Image: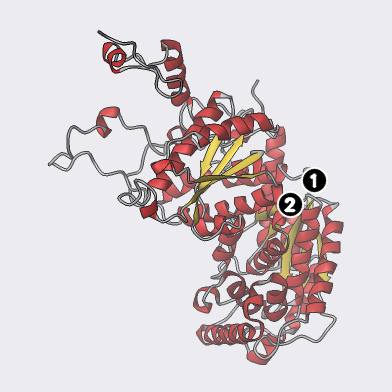
Amino acid sequence: MTWPRPVPVIGDRTSAAQRAADPSGWAFDPNTVAALHAVVDARRDVRRYRPDPVPPDLLRTVLGAGHRAPSVGHSQPWRFVVVTEQATRDRAAALADRERLRQAELLTPDRRARLLDLQLEGIREAPVGVVVACDRRAHATGVLGRATFPDADLWSCACAIQNIWLAARASGLGLGWVTLFQPTDLAQLLDLPEGVETLGWLCLGWPDERPPEPGLVRHGWSTRLSLDDVVLAERWPADGSPEAPVSHLAGPEPEAVVAARDSGDDLLAVPGSLGVLDRAVDRVLALPGAEPATGTLVVVAGDHPVATAHAVSAYPASVTADVLAATATGESLGAATAAQAGLAVRAHSAVSPDPQGDLVTADALTPAAVEALVAEGRELGRELARHGLVCLGEVGIGNTTVAAALTCALLGLDPERAVGLGAGADAAMLARKRAVVTTALARARAEHGAALGEPRTALAALGGPELAVLAGVTLGAAAEGVPVVLDGLVTSVSAVVAVRLEPAARTALVAGQRSRERAHAEVLTELGLEPLLDLRLRSGEGVGAALGAQLLLTALGARRTAGRVS
């Protein structure tokens, strides 16, 4: 006698006999299977986004797909940090830009150019950022499956990312996975506790591109391997195949490719034709201010007791006033270069309201003087912004020593890496400058401790009047949505101060040049900026900013007037 099989009201209702009779019976219908493979095949790393918001219910649906991912020991270690605040996205974008430049320096020249050509603006453009974090605070031995593979929790989070990616693609959303971060920097940005690690930043939004193939394939970075190249039978072949992955640190040069610049799709030109200039144009056009057709070079002058007290300059302090006067009459090199670029010129003397120190024995400025000078610069920046882009120049005997000291404090550099020759110095003077900066740093750190990392404190301890005013000019112009074109080390480290005070100011910055000062490249990397020019200039006075501005204005004009395709 046989009895009817008890069928559970929950769980698996099938029997062994049913499963044996139809082993493939769990499959979906062919249309559903085809749709799944279509979504998998069409998944893309999207880099351009529309500003339209993502409906909250759709965002929840996509994140829900991530939450249904498999996880080791059903631990569900993922945490999805949803970021929509522009200020946080701007800070994250600055971190990614910085790492992009650092990684580019490790590559062969062709690979470096290709990396720098890649569009990485999604962090700013996408309306939603999702940081997938892995909560690893549970000990590995306490999670089934992690005692033998401790990183399986990270793999689980990667599965969640893939689920999110596929769900987003099926709904018409674009997703880009950005890992150009130092994990600790991204963790600090989001206040993640110890033991919670990030897997990068997901840009999520409506795509402003519909790439038919993966972006890195399109850019000639690599091609997809055939399935036969990655499927092995039973064990790893004894002859050592398949080949090791290609290292782009010293890999063979691939065929020439066209670097895509999606923002110029409608121009009668190859996207990315103007290279770094195209990126600068995109940065300028994204600002809320009016598109500039001209601008002003502002040359800010300041005196520094360190120059006379410690002999760190080849020129007398009186040269500062002479160059400033020549700037006012249009006869300095900076003013003459600005005139050739069609820029107006403003000469400005930055004078501390309080006595200044020599860095070695006393702080350069009082806190009150810093506040007053930065405020003075803000007002000047707002005024100049009404006339187009603002180009920064400076003159100040001894200020490369000051700028190097400030850079060391803000970026944690060793004086050996930061102190350069300056104008007209020799080996003996270079040694004195390094000694002065080393001593000044030691004094400032002893007096201020951890507070030296705060921009106002660092500016007071190791800065100078023109650096404070330049930081204020940057903030004032950026607040008006106007691009700020930097010159050499002094203006660039002033911009670092501005960005540390108000991170959103970074979006207005354009690096006119990279000078010969040793710390300048480090400062530009900190700002995440590529210079328009690299001419080994030593002139100061805004010459590099004026030259860069001339290129930028030319490129803006070309973008306006070039033929377009329908």
User: Quick one: quadrant of the N terminus?
Assistant: top left
Q: Quadrant of residue 314?
A: bottom right
Residue 243: where, in percent of width, then height?
Answer: 24, 41
User: Quick one: quadrant of the C terminus?
Assistant: top right
Residue 46: where, in percent of width, then height?
Answer: 54, 34
Residue 480 appears in view: yes
Residue pictured at 65% horizontal, 67% vertical:
493
SS for tag 2?
loop
Q: Is residue 226 above or below residue 328?
A: above
- Looking at numbered disc 1 in the image, what kind of residue is underneath it? Gly
CA separation in Å, label 1 and label 2:
8 Å
Instruction: Indicate which disc, 1 or 2, sits on the residue closer to the N terminus.
Output: 1
Given contact means CB atoms under 8 Å apart, are the residues at marks 1 and 2 in contact?
Answer: yes
- Left or right: residue 224 compared with residue 50: left
Residue 121 appears in view: no
Residue pictured at 59% horizontal, 55% vertical:
528
Q: Which numbered marker is on residue 82?
A: none
Q: Residues within 10 Å of mark 2 (few under 14, many from 20)?
A: many
Most foreground residue, 423 or 392: 392
Most foreground residue, 513 or 315: 513
Return the residue found at the far front: 1
Give the residue at mark 1: 289
Most foreground residue, 515 or 449: 449
Q: Residues within 10 Å of mark 1 (few under 14, many from 20)?
A: some
Residue 231: where, in percent of width, then height?
Answer: 25, 32
Q: Quadrant of residue 301?
A: bottom right
SS for tag 1?
loop
Give the residue at mark 2: 483
